[in-house]
């Protein structure tokens, strides 16, 4: 009898989306992928199965658990369904708190902690739980794994993770820097090492999407990151402010009549590119109005200034830089932003090849040949990182392939 190959389904639940990828784990072959994005109107399910035509279907589903159920149903349909034999399911979970510094097999206790941490990630942890519950109901008995976005940053030193606030806040209430986008930063650090051909590197990774963060990585280990206790700290983002003066917030509460909920909503949903430009949270739309709209120009200038400032700080933490990595939607697809960020970073040995930058297709090195530090554009693969962590974890309690059939 032919041995069944290990298959891992990856679920990535965002605040307004649900993405999935199905892998043949040992070969890392992508068998199917797709997702549902509620920010697009009408809402559509996009489904791609290897070797078949992409399917797009309009949906009225509004809840993550219903969407997960629908995706699982499609993956099981037909005699050649890719989900016919499934080994495990891996889930992206944004916040693991201090409890989880690595991927874990999901148990009732793990679900309880993820639920408790929802107050720190209210847009993300609850929808991850919805996906976990849907899989439990439809595929009972299939092992599930939680891979945490905070885990990669668990290696931060006490000095890097500690806020200079009263001791009670840190010791009793857990106020500290956690960092986010860890699955992306982890993948990109590993991919950069592959591209450069060595692991003893000082890397600055800039994950620039609707959410944005920068990390400092030494020899594959994260030593600092721009996001903090929540995903609101750090860079200017699509709708999030990033770091602002805390005294300004106190002033708004005391003297301008804002309450806590209004302040929270403004900082998370009305700020960033959208707030400064008055145009959109979408970088493409803001860039399209650069020539005619002074607010759009200011938004780009602030956005780039914050990134450049943070890259410099991370390079200082590392004592130098061997490569700057751009990733995520803006980092991968906005050469104008990459160009502007790199313009004043020559002092770090970063010299951008403008032609390569304009024409590159990730993964690519867009630094000049003589540049002493490399500039890389990498397609982030959070799904692959989750799959690998799931494969590693479940491999200890399921049957493994015999011999070296799938040796890598």
Image (cartoon, rainbow, N blue to C red):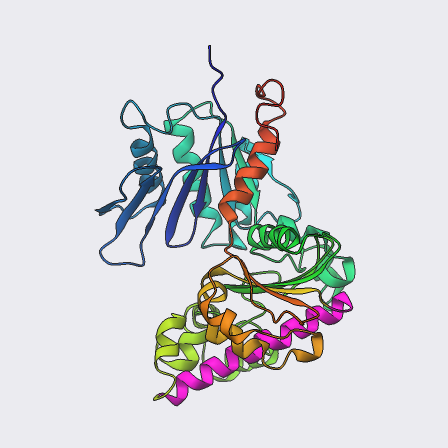
Residue 308 counted in the magenta span: yes
Q: Residue furthest front?
A: 369
The segment highlighted magenta reads 293-320
Judge by depth and name the residue closer to the eye, 2 or 255: 2
Judge by depth and name the residue closer to the eye, 278 or 52: 52
Judge by depth and name the residue closer to the eye, 230 or 277: 277
How many numbered circles are shown? 0
> Is residue 254 visible to the viewer in this orientation of the structure?
yes
How far across and down, in percent of the image, does residue 15 sit?
41, 54
Above or below, 120 against 323 in this view is: above
Quadrant containing the C terminus is top right
> Is residue 259 visible to the viewer in this orientation of the structure?
no
How far across and down, in percent of the image, does residue 290 sit?
39, 84
Residue 367 counted in the magenta span: no
Judge by depth and name the residue closer to the eye, 316 or 371: 371
Most frequent secondary structure within the magenta stretch? helix
How far across and down, in percent of the image, does residue 388 sit?
57, 38
Q: Residue at x 58, y 56 (%)?
A: 180
Q: Residue at x 64, y 43 (%)?
A: 100
Q: Quadrant of residue 368?
A: bottom right
Q: Residue furthest top?
A: 1
Above or below, 138 against 320 in this view is: above
Q: Residue at x 73, y 56 (%)?
A: 171
How far across and down, in percent of the image, does residue 9 sit?
45, 35
Q: Residue at x 51, y 77 (%)?
A: 303
Above or below, 66 against 276 in this view is: above
């Amino acid at each position: 009898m032919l041995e069944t190959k290990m298959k891992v389904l990856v679920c990535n639940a965002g605040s307004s989306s649900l993405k999935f990828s199905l892998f043949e784990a040992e070969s890392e072959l992508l068998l199917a992928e797709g997702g549902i994005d509620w920010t697009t109107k009408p809402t559509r399910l996009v489904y791609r199965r290897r070797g078949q035509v992409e399917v797009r279907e309009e949906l009225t589903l509004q809840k993550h658990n219903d969407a997960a159920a629908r995706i699982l149903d499609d993956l099981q349909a037909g005699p050649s369904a890719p989900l016919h034999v499934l080994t495990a399911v891996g889930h992206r979970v944004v916040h693991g708190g201090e409890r989880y510094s690595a991927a874990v097999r999901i148990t009732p206790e793990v679900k309880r902690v993820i639920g408790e941490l929802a107050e720190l990630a209210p847009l993300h942890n609850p929808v991850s739980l919805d996906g976990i519950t849907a899989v439990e109901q439809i595929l009972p008995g299939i092992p599930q794994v939680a891979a945490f976005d905070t885990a990669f940053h668990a290696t931060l030193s006490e000095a890097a993770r500690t806020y200079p606030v009263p001791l009670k806040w840190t010791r009793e209430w857990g106020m500290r820097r956690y960092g986010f986008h860890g699955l992306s930063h982890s993948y990109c650090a590993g991919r950069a090492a592959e591209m450069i051909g060595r692991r003893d590197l000082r890397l600055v990774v800039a994950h620039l999407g609707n959410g944005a963060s920068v990390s400092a990585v030494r020899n594959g280990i994260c030593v600092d990151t721009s996001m903090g206790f929540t995903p609101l700290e750090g860079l200017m983002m699509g709708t999030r402010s990033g770091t602002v003066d805390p005294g300004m917030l106190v002033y708004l509460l005391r003297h301008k009549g804002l309450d806590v909920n209004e302040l929270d909503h403004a900082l998370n949903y009305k700020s960033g590119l959208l707030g400064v430009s008055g145009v959109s949270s979408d970088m493409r739309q803001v860039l399209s109005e650069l020539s005619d709209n002074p607010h759009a120009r200011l938004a780009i200038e602030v956005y780039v200034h914050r990134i450049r400032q943070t890259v410099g700080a991370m390079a200082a933490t590392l004592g130098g830089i061997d490569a700057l990595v751009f990733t995520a939607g803006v980092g991968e697809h906005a050469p104008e932003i990459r160009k502007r960020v790199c313009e004043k970073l020559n002092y770090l040995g970063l010299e951008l090849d403008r032609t390569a930058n304009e024409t590159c297709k990730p993964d690519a090195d867009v630094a000049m040949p003589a540049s002493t530090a490399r500039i890389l554009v990498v397609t982030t693969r959070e799904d692959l990182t989750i799959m690998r962590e799931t494969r590693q974890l479940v491999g200890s309690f399921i049957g493994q392939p015999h011999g070296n059939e799938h040796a890598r």
